[in-house]
Amino acid sequence: MSDVTIIGMPRSNLTRTVRIACLEKEIPFAFSSRNVQPPGHPPTPELLRNNPFGKVPVLTHGQFVLYETAAICRYIDDNFPGPLLRPVHAEKAARMNQWISVAMTRLDPDIIRNFVIPMFFADDVTRRDPAFTTRMNEMTDRIRHDLSALDAAYGDGWVCGDRFTIPDMMIMPMIHYLNAMPGGPEMLANAPNVEDAFARFKARTSAAQTDPLLPEKLLKSA
Ligand SMILES: N[C@@H](CCC(=O)N[C@@H](CS)C(=O)NCC(=O)O)C(=O)O
């Protein structure tokens, strides 16, 4: 037993990223959602003890506690035997770091925080608010731009070529949510390399085992 526990929420895209990293690394781990706040609630004292910023995922490995998705993925890759989650060649490794940074600082805010989450939780009054529609249209334009850059990156299979690496584990769960939102499939249709990568992602065991089982009807009507 590796004594690794991932703390997070099943529907959190970044929690899914680190669960995928553990599965791809082929290390046994426990997954715990105990004492993690439901969406929209303040962080619980238990979570704040592990992460003062109140976010998931958190990894515990024995007494060692680590937060921040990129740090957790790198720790998993560096500290356990198993398939490499990163390229070996220096230029490709640098490219991987570039995409980790883009995924965390641009794609996650654009796709998840500023589009999927507001769309998902908007009530009827909000949906009828023209300011909300304007904001969502602006985000759609931004995401279309993000997808065109991603599409060029996915031309060789995954962002670092033929190996499924850490940034793919971050980006593909975001694409999963985008694809389930109204307008998402249309946005993805303009990024065929990303669509193709998403189809290959869904066929992986690690993706199937971490599928957030989205309530399709709810999302399509969001
Ligand atoms: N920079 C953090 C961001 C983590 C994050 O935003 N996690 C979301 C779930 S995907 C969360 O904890 N949301 C709950 C909240 O903000 O209250 C990381 O890379 O792990």
Image (cartoon, rainbow, N blue to C red):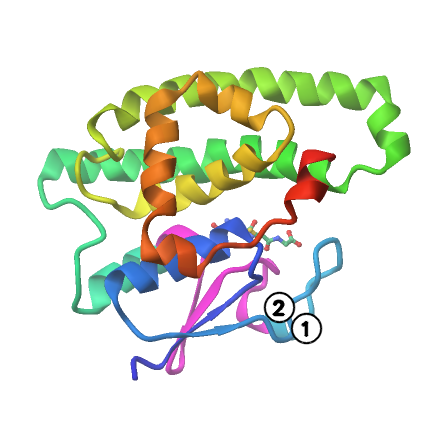
Span of residues in magenta: 49-71
Q: Position of residue 79 (x, y in %)?
A: 22, 68
The residue wearing badge 1 is 45
Residue 134 placement: quadrant: top right
> In this view, which residue lies farthest toward the left?
89
Residue 75 appears anywhere in the view: no
Along the line of sight, which residue is nearer the eye, 159 or 216? Answer: 216
**Identity of the residue drawn at 76% across and 20% down:** 133
Q: CA distance from mark 2 to mark 1?
A: 5 Å
- Picture quarter containing residue 99? top left
Q: Nearer the viewer, residue 208 or 13?
A: 208
Circle number at residue 7: none
Residue occupying image coordinates x 29% and y 63%: 76
Label 2 environment density (alpha carbons within 10 Å; few <14, some 14–19, many ≥20): some
Q: Within 10 Å of the Cα at label 1, are there few (<14), some (14-19), or many (20+) other Cα atoms? A: some
* Residue displayed at 68% across by 73% down: 45
51 relative position to 40: left or right: left
Residue 148 against residue 126 in the figure, above or below: above
Mark 1 lies on a secondary structure that is helix
Could you say whether the residue bearing mark 2 is in a helix, strand or loop?
helix
Q: Is residue 63 a member of the stretch shown in magenta?
A: yes
Q: Position of residue 199 (x, y in %)?
A: 36, 37
At 45% from the left and 40% from the top, the residue drawn is 104
Q: Is residue 149 visible?
A: yes
Compared with 50, 20 (above or below) is: above
Mark 1 CB near ligand 1 (8 Å cut): no
Give the image location of residue 165, x and y in percent: 26, 46
Q: Which residue is mark 2?
A: 48
Circles 2 and 1, Cβ within 8 Å, touching? The answer is: yes
Three-letter residue code for mark 2: Leu
Q: The N terminus is located in which quarter?
A: bottom left
- For the residue with label 2, is its CB less than 8 Å from the closest atom of ligand 1? no
